[in-house]
Amino acid sequence: MKKFQNDISLFDPIGNDRDGNEITMLDIITKETDDYADTIHLKQETKLMYEAVFSVLNQRERTVIRLRYGLGYAETFTQQQIASFLGISRSYVSRIEKKALQKLHAALQEPQG
């Protein structure tokens, strides 16, 4: 096969690693690619979860779940941190979280349609 001027190959060197070894594009492409069906399924499940969080939970439950599991935040928070933030006890946060998770579980078990 004839190679043209702008053609590239996965085997062409693109640089060197820290040890001075030559790196090719093939070296940096991950060997394990996600199964597209799994990726699509995960996106659909995530969308359903977000919809349930905003349609099934009341404001306080939503706040606790979002903080606890990092939904929309860069980090997750402990029950104690959430309790301090909301000005309530840690045990009350625990009860809110448990009730909210039960509501989400029930909502996600209902047939979609």
Image (spheres, rainbow, N blue to C red):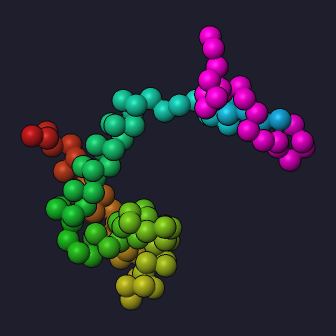
Q: Position of residue 3 (x, y in %)?
A: 64, 19
Nearer to us in this view, 65 or 22: 22
- Decide: is 36 above or below 74: above
Q: Which residues are magenta?
A: 1-21
Locate residue 75, reporting x and y percent: 50, 67
> Is residue 31 in view from this perspective?
no
Which is nearer the eye, 113 or 8? 8
Q: Can you say which quadrant of the picture contains the C terminus?
A: top left
Residue ID at (28%, 70%) = 61
How far from the left and from the top, in percent, is residue 46?
32, 49
- Up/down of 16 relative to 88, above or below: above
- In this image, 62 relative to 34: left or right? left
Instruction: Determine the residue positioned at 32% across, 73% down.
Output: 63
| Residue 30 image-quadrant placement | top right
Of 111 and 48, nearer the camera is 48
Please say whether residue 26 is one of the residues in the magenta stretch. Answer: no
Q: Nearer the viewer, residue 53 or 104?
A: 53
Instruction: Name the quadrant of the N terminus.
Output: top right
Residue 71: image location, x then y, percent: 38, 63
